[in-house]
Amino acid sequence: MLKGMEICEPSTETQWRQYYDLRQQVLGDWAGHDPEMLKDSLEDDSFHLMAVEDGRCVGVGRVHFNHAAEGQIRFMAVDADCRQRGIGRAILEALEIYLLRNATASVVLNAHSQAVGFYQKHGYAMMDDDKEPGANVHCVKMRKQLMR
């Protein structure tokens, strides 16, 4: 765990507001500044995590199940002023632990082109080079085997 940092599930109204505000702030360009594009029908059925430092949300991530053997990570974001400190890694690892505890064999995600190296460093491999529907940035589909 990072010193002074807590990785937790958002639970209060304030935490949820901070969670979605950071998602919008970091991923808003991808969504064309439409906050509703940063939510989908799986929000209530997903596992959400946030990194909190000094009462402030500095990172977020979410995972849902595509089916029993596969999870999908979405909406990973770290505050621009807090990058390169291991926050994204901590959230990613916590999401993967959640999937492993639920006996999920693999995980997929759509990485923004500038984040591909981050995910490769953490064991993800490119599936193909495909643009996310409706996105105005280039995304790459990636996969990681969690269990054999």
Image (tube, rainbow, N blue to C red):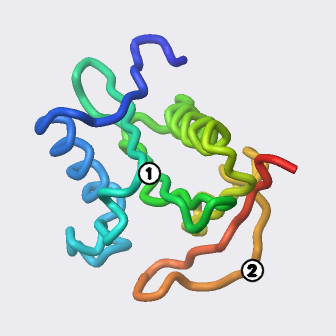
> Which residue position holds label 1?
62
Q: Is residue 46 above or below residue 54?
A: below
Task: Judge depth for marks 2 and 1 and give the one in front.
Answer: 1
Q: CA distance from mark 2 to mark 1?
A: 22 Å
Query: Seen in the image, is 58 located left or right of residue 72?
Result: left
Which amino acid type corresponds to the residue marked 2 in the rendered image? Asp
Q: Is residue 72 above or below residue 118?
A: below
Q: Secondary structure at mark 2?
A: strand
Q: Position of residue 77 (x, y in %)?
A: 42, 50
Which amino acid type corresponds to the residue marked 1 in the rendered image? Arg
Q: Which mark is residue 98?
A: none
**CA neighbours of label 1 inside 10 A, class few (<14), some (14 to 19), many (20+):** many
At x 47% / y 12%, what residue is drawn? 3
Of the pair 117 and 37, the residue shown nearer to us: 37
Quarter where residue 144 is shown: bottom right
Of the pair 12 and 132, the residue shown nearer to us: 12
Disc nearer the start of the sequence (2/1): 1
Q: Which mark is residue 128?
A: 2
Quarter where residue 80 is shown: top left
Quarter of the N terminus within the rendering? top right
Query: Seen in the image, is 119 located left or right of residue 73?
Result: right
At x 42% / y 27%, what residue is drawn? 7
At x 49% / y 58%, what residue is drawn? 64
At x 56% / y 34%, what residue is drawn? 94
